[in-house]
Image (cartoon, helix red, strand yellow):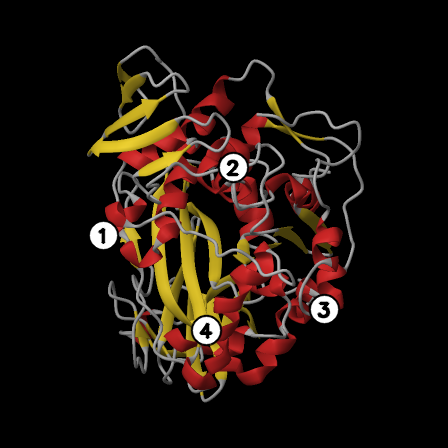
Amino acid sequence: MVEFVTGSNRSAGASYADILDADSHPVRDILRAESPLEPGPTRIPADYYYSREIHEREIEKIWKRSWQLACHEDELRDIGDYYVYDIATLSFLVVKTAEDTYQAFYNQCLHRGRQLCDQSGKSAYVFRCPFHGWAWNLDGSLQEIPCEWDFPSVDKAEYGLPEVQVARWGGFLFINPDPEAESFASHIGNLSDHFTLLPFEKRYKAVHVAKVLKVNWKVAQEAFMEAYHVIATHPTILDSLGDSNSKYDVFGNYSRAISPQQVESPHIRPYEPAPDSRMFTRLKHAITGFLYERIEDNLVAVTDHKGRVSHFHADGSWVNGPMTHCDPNMCNWIGGKQLPGAESVPYPAMPEPAPSENRRSVAAKPIREDLRATLGDSVDEISDAELLDAIYFTVFPNWHPWGSFNDIFYRFSPNGDNPDECVHECWYMRPSPNGEERPDPAPVHWLDADADYTEAPELGLLAKVFNQDVHNMPQVQKGLKAMKRQEVIFADYEESKIRHWYQLYLRAMELD
């Protein structure tokens, strides 16, 4: 690594404002908006990530009181369609009860507590408990009690399913079990202003992958909230991502990060790829300059500056040779499981910019042309930044839409009643063809805790990136429990999205 202390409060290289000033097209004001979090250390007790008491407090203070993404409207196309939304120990039914009307209820029978529906379904006309047959209408009103004569104290008008608040935004359905909660509009503030170029109403769910991770849900989502981890976790993108030159802003209940693409990381020297580089099987490390080459499944050859070759497994463990340590993230990228056809994919070559162009404007051109079929000639007014950069939001408590034309959308949730596991969901929200009616949403492709992300090839390149992201997570969960100093600390600026999230979290948990 070649960049640590710079003598200033930022990394070397161009600031994001400088990058926007060099854009080949007009830049929207909202991209330039400055709303940084005030500096100051944030230290969080380590047991917040594994404590049973904290987990149960989250159920009471977060999941029973917060606006949370439940599902997409397209999963409830017809009256009677319903979606089972589970979070921690809670379960809710989201139902299309009439044209353009959605309601949500606690998903439990009021007789003996049996969950009414175990999975989502279509075209229901009644919700009948499988245990004793009590039945409720779509609107939650009690329809029938078998042997009703035997329950003289039950007033049917008082035994409707307990209802929870529902809100709609961008084609998504949100719920909040707290009847006294702030309105959803107040909760998200001006979030919609960031998504005017291609609003979510004009997108459909083209991919939905859900994977169990052996880590607390907060650890998992924090790994996707900052670019500070890129230098160690994602060495394969350091030549094209200005990780430490990212811009971070906070706005009410949400935050934003923007990481510039086609900008070299300040941590590396000028990068020259190795001859005959291949994207997934033969790459030079952007910091050390060592060459990593796939020999076969689970075997990587690493060549140092002196031409000496050592071999390692895909997890970074040493096999033979003079060098006994290497980068495990590079080993996984090169020697781990691959996507179909990935072994022959060449390293992407960037055309030489013309005198009036730069690296970013050249990279933006094909993306702009791809969008022309959807947006017409309005694409000529769109900045390179909107087309290239990683713009990623976090909305409290657990959903993470990406901005502008990026189709990534994340959600992180505890895996049932286990504070040591979570579910990471990735959706691709792609433009509806010709802006017409949205195609049917993709079904969920579930991956268990031991599965590799490449088992969901519909993720494309992101599958390999996710494998790097989750490589450290089980060790983080283990390490948090063993730390002598039982606290974690977050950087003033580069981890300000996490710091801002904890301000909201501690307030909601009544721990501030």
Instruction: Mark 1 and mark 3 in contact? Answer it, CB < 8 Å.
Output: no
Mark 4 or mark 2, earlier in chain: 2
Q: Residue at x 53, y 37 (%)?
A: 230
- Across and down, in percent, residue 226 comes to 59, 43
Residue holding disc 1: 341
Q: Name the kind of residue labelled 4 in the image.
A: Asp
Secondary structure at badge 1 equals: loop
Depth order, front residue of 317/492: 317
Q: Residue at x 40, y 47 (%)?
A: 423
Tell me the distance, in whole angstroms, between the alpha carbons under discs 3 and 2: 31 Å
Residue 480, placed above or below residue 435: above
Residue holding disc 2: 271
In the rendered structure, the answer to whether residue 504 lies left or right of residue 36 reads left
- Across and down, in percent, residue 9 comes to 78, 34
In the rendered structure, the answer to whether residue 468 lies left or right of residue 120 reads right
Whether residue 170 is visible: no
The numbered mark at residue 477 is none
Q: Quadrant of the N terminus?
A: top right
Mark 1 or mark 3, earlier in chain: 3
Secondary structure at badge 4 equals: helix
Residue holding disc 3: 28
